[in-house]
Image (tube, rainbow, N blue to C red):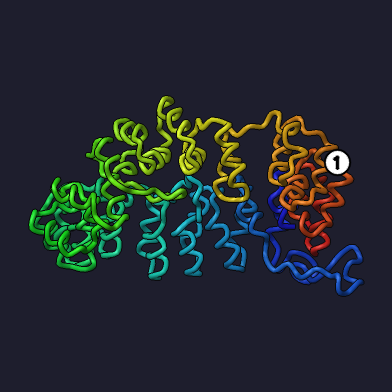
Amino acid sequence: MDGVAGNPTLPTPLLLSLLRAGAGDAGEGGGGAGVRDGVGARGAESPAPVDRPPRRAVQRAGLPEAAVALILAHPDPRVRMDFALSADVEPARRARLADDPVPKVRAALAYGPEWHAPRTSVPALPDAVCARLLDDPEPSVREALLDSPHLTVPFRASLATHHDPAARLSAVLRGWERLAPGERAALSADPDPGVRRAAALRECPRDARLTTELLRDPRSAAEALRHGLLTRADAERYVAGRTHLVALAENPSLPRDLVDRLAVDPDEDVRLAVSIRPELSEERRRAIDFTVGALDRRGVQWVQDGLADPDVLRRAATSGHLMLQRAAARSPHLPPDLLRLLVRAEDPVVETNLCVHHPDTPQDVMMRVYGRLGGTFSAWMAETHPRFPREGLAARYADHPDGDHRRLALRDPAATPALVERLSHDPVLRTRQAAAGDPRLPLHRLREVLHVHELASAAGANPALPVDDMAAVLSRAGLRA
């Protein structure tokens, strides 16, 4: 039933039947207690009652208005929470939950979908709705909104004058660059100490006095050492005291002689931090004794801040320093010559970052990442890349010794129904599941796998599943259209 709930060919009457589950009118006995087709007569084989709609039915894209109305009126708050957390439902529709009587539903709406796919983003709720949620009487709703990664930049900046110090703090942490000078000055003098501290940390790269003050506070010392404008006395004191040396080694204002001293520090992490400083020549970098881990993915702040800056990207991508190359490979804006240069590095992390972030990653790179990391998020990002190869995969991989590679054969438009059926018997579960969801699977086999526990969801979602078979799935669960 979960698979049917996500089937792109599911007719509206069956979708509405799914959405009534647990609402008191889903079928005999209120959504699952009445079992059809004689299954109930066998006792132990009776399915469990359906207490609420499958999440995939609630979170579908392009829901008809009748479906939305059922969801918004559903008595189970978990259903409304599922709707609030859908990345595929339009923000204006999700926003209709802003007055939901259950705080957990409003909090789910305020935070929005858990979404971590770098190539796509979730549209934000309308700013007016966010403003209402920010003034919600429940603290959990307000906190969820301020933690949301989906707020618009203008809304985040507008929080600078909000009466709640948590909102003003959010404006400092995530909207500082959009604030007018007067707003920044007001936040720097804010009555809340946490807001003042955060504003000072934003201003300290240009203010040595502020930096010195922040260094006296253990809560801000490390960040101030990393970014603040240092006096000579403060820099020497921390070098001598060997406190927060890795943070200090990244500070742009650190005097050159102290940079040289840290470049030969006995701590390898300190030397590595020095080696990624932006002002160093390539010759100077090579002179530092550092090691980059084979799978080290830590960020380089000045490169991260300049992923859309051609000059920053060129400096990082053409560097001989592997961490700088890896950082540059996270940019979707690399021009063709730098993309080719990074591909030639043949570094696993560089290749993975290109697969995840760059729209023109070469197909052979994607195939290497997939082959190396099959079954991981990075491999999935490679496989779902718009340029991931399709043609020729059946001939190349149908008999591959690795099951993840055999699954690639199903991506080939030339894969035959016979091959799809053979792969539906594959010893590797993920390959069998992919074949069960392939619309080229012969109908007799599709109906078989619909009753195989580990393949049933994939088969239910198969676009070739006849409507009568979908209706039978719902009927066995006690649901009727």
Residue located 80% across and 44% down the image: 423
Query: In x, y percent, where is residue 265?
Result: 24, 55
Query: In x, y percent, where is residue 422?
Result: 83, 43
Which residue is more in the foreground, 274 or 129? 274
Q: Residue furthest bottom?
A: 43
How many numbered circles does the render carry? 1
Q: Is residue 183 visible?
A: no
Residue 9 sits in quarter:
top right
Query: In x, y percent, where is residue 317?
Result: 37, 34
Residue 406, compared with residue 430, is above or below; it is: above
Left or right: 42, with 405 as reference point: right
Query: In x, y percent, where is residue 235?
Result: 13, 56
Residue located 86% across and 74% down the image: 44
Residue located 80% across and 64% down the image: 478
Q: Amino acid at mark 1?
A: Pro
Which residue is more in the foreground, 229 or 343? 343
Left or right: 201, with 145 as reference point: left
Q: Which residue is mark 1?
A: 442
